[in-house]
Image: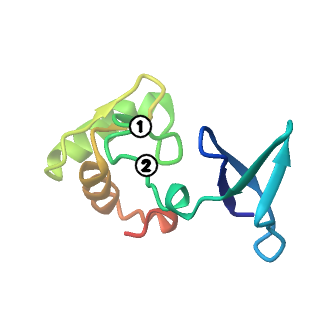
Amino acid sequence: MPVYCYTDGRETISRWFPASHHPKRIRLNGRTYVRDFAAEAVGVPASKGWPLECYASGVAPDQAGELRDYLAKKGVPTEVSADGNPIYRDAAHRRKALKARGLHDKASFF
């Protein structure tokens, strides 16, 4: 379900609704909120969330050193946690490291 943003001029709130069943106005605590398209268009800053420790592309803890060496040899030096999870500095670094390992993240559009 998508998130829809509503504002009353002083405060902006977000609510989850099915795509075909979102109201144009919300009445909450005696205040009327109208849909705010501009607030819905705001994205998340690219710097948020980095560095990122990736559990999905991690390996067993005893393979952490092996992964670190492999990525360095492929030209993508990457820090690997003691748990075996690679720590990506930014989106470009993550893309290169995943490509070096032959992995593809369908949710990240690359």
Percent coordinates x, y for residue 100 in the rendering: 27, 59
Which of label 2 and label 1 is nearer to you?
A: 2
Q: Position of residue 47 (x, y in %)?
A: 31, 41
Above or below residue 21? Residue 77 is above
Q: In screen coordinates, is 88 left or right of 85?
A: left
Q: Looking at numbered disc 2 in the image, what kind of residue is underneath it?
A: Val
Q: Quick check: 9 left or right of 53?
A: right
The image quarter in which residue 40 lies: bottom right
Disc 2 secondary structure class: loop
Q: Is residue 1 above or below residue 90?
A: below
List x then y, in percent, for residue 42.
45, 55
Give left or right: position of 30 versus 35: right
Residue at image point 36% right, 46% down: 45
Which disc, if any, is residue 44? Answer: 2
Mark 1 burial class by Cα count in 10 Å: few <14, some 14-19, many 20+: few
**Dots 2, 1 in contact, CB < 8 A:** yes
Categorize mark 2 by other alpha carbons within 10 Å: few (<14), some (14-19), many (20+).
few
* Quarter in which the N terminus is drawn: bottom right
Residue at the outermost top position:
82
Which of the two residues, 100 or 31, is positioned nearer the viewer here?
A: 31
Residue type for callout 1 = Gly
Query: Disc 1 marks which residue?
Result: 49
